[in-house]
Amino acid sequence: MAQQIREDYRPAGYGIPFHGGSAAYYHREEPPFFVAYAEAISLGLTQLVGAYSGYVALREWLKRRMKNRMDAYLIEVEEQAADLGSLSLAELVSHREALYEIRHRALSDLVSERVLANESFTIFQNHLRDEFAAIEARIMEKQAGG
């Protein structure tokens, strides 16, 4: 039986178990696990990193899109509040109604999660409140006869 032992180690082909040191000797030229599967491991890691970076890029794009939506609302408010001094009472009331409509759309977008309740939204709310106050003050002046 000892004459049948060759260096092509196949323990199933022999009826006797090999010593651990003998098995290690016969496996000495086999590459370690990480060397044998280096390409598959690197492909998997590359795909994981690519998927993660795609996720991060998509998340940032969505945040920018939400911020751009808030910026558009701010621009609309600014357009409605421009040059209040030269407007008639009816025009002031019309501008106030337009501001209510802008506020309603912004809040609807907030509820449907198309905008974030972050600093941009807080700035929008403060600016909208100030413009409402300015329009109300001008309406009061006009109604008082000024």
Image (spheres, helix red, strand yellow):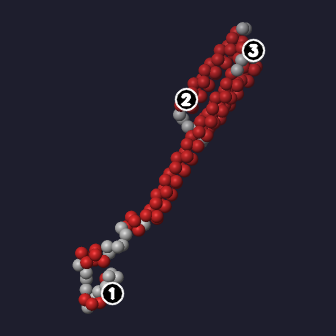
Counting every numbered tag in the picture gives 3
Residue 85: % across, % down: 72, 14
Label 1 vs label 3, nearer the camera: 1
Q: Quadrant of the N terminus?
A: bottom left
Give 22 or 62, whichever is nearer the viewer.
22
Residue at 42% x, 66% y: name it. 37
Q: Secondary structure at mark 2?
A: helix
User: In this rendering, would 39 be left or right of 122?
Assistant: left
Quarter assignment of residue 96: top right
The Cα–Cα distance between marks 1 and 3, rounded to whole angstroms, is: 101 Å
- The foreground one among 105 and 66 is 66
The answer to whether any part of residue 49 appears in the image is yes
Question: Mark 2 or mark 3: which comes first in sequence?
Answer: 3
Q: Which residue in the protein does label 2 denote?
A: 122
The residue labelled by disc 1 is 13
Q: Which residue is mark 3?
A: 86
